[in-house]
Amino acid sequence: MDTNEIKRNITAQIAIVNQSFSKAGPIWIKDPMLEDIDSLERNLKTNRLYFKFYMVGAIILAGILLVISLLKTFKMLNNLDLNNGGLMILFTIVFGLNAFAYYKVKVNLENKIYLLKLLKSFD
């Protein structure tokens, strides 16, 4: 295979990754379209932190909801009304959706950094 063809394929893949950033939603990230590897790695570091925060929050809230639901199902917790737990359910859903959105951005950033490093190695 010719190196120019490989470079064209890599730049086409980078363009596909750049298009996927617009679909990610309202995630705070500084210029994912840049070609600067250092700034992308800084963005990736902060994105990983947000992803871990939302993932841990979603897991903890889902676990609490599961325990409360099981206790309520087996009639061990009669004084708690689950109708008032709607806010907790809402927070669980929001944390889960944010964790998924940050995961998508994290994976796209990792792919773009890898492709840029690969393209740089051909030069």
Image (spheres, grey):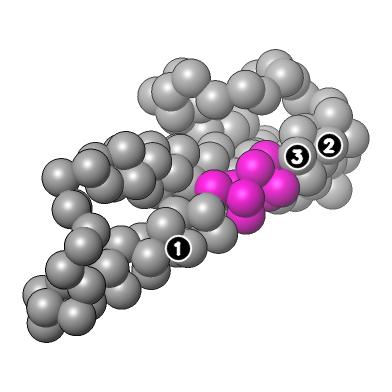
Q: Is residue 50 magenta?
A: yes
Labelled pair 1, 3 in contact (Cβ < 8 Å): no
Circle 2 residue: 42
Labelled pair 1, 2 in contact (Cβ < 8 Å): no
Q: Residue 9's spot in the image, x, y percent?
A: 55, 39
- For label 2, the SS is helix
Residue shown at the point (38%, 68%) measured from the top left: 63
Give the amino acid at mark 1: Ile
Give the amino acid at mark 2: Arg
Which residue is nearer to you in this view: 72 or 102? Answer: 72
Q: Residue 62's spot in the image, x, y percent?
A: 36, 61
Which residue is nearer to you in this view: 21 or 11? Answer: 21
Magenta highlight range: 47-54
Which residue is nearer to you in this view: 122 or 42? Answer: 42
Labelled pair 3, 2 in contact (Cβ < 8 Å): yes
Please tell me whether the stretch drawn in magenta is mainly helix, strand or loop. helix
Give the amino acid at mark 3: Thr
Q: Is residue 62 magenta?
A: no
Closer to the chain start, of discs 1 and 2, is 2
Residue shown at the point (84%, 48%) measured from the top left: 121
Circle 3 residue: 46
Number of the front mark, 1 or 2: 1
Q: Give left or right: position of 22 versus 122.
A: left
Residues under labels 1 and 3: Cα distance? Answer: 20 Å
Observer able to see residue 10: no
Q: Residue 32's spot in the image, x, y percent?
A: 66, 24
- For label 3, the SS is helix
Q: Residue 92's spot in the image, x, y percent?
A: 36, 48
Circle 1 residue: 59
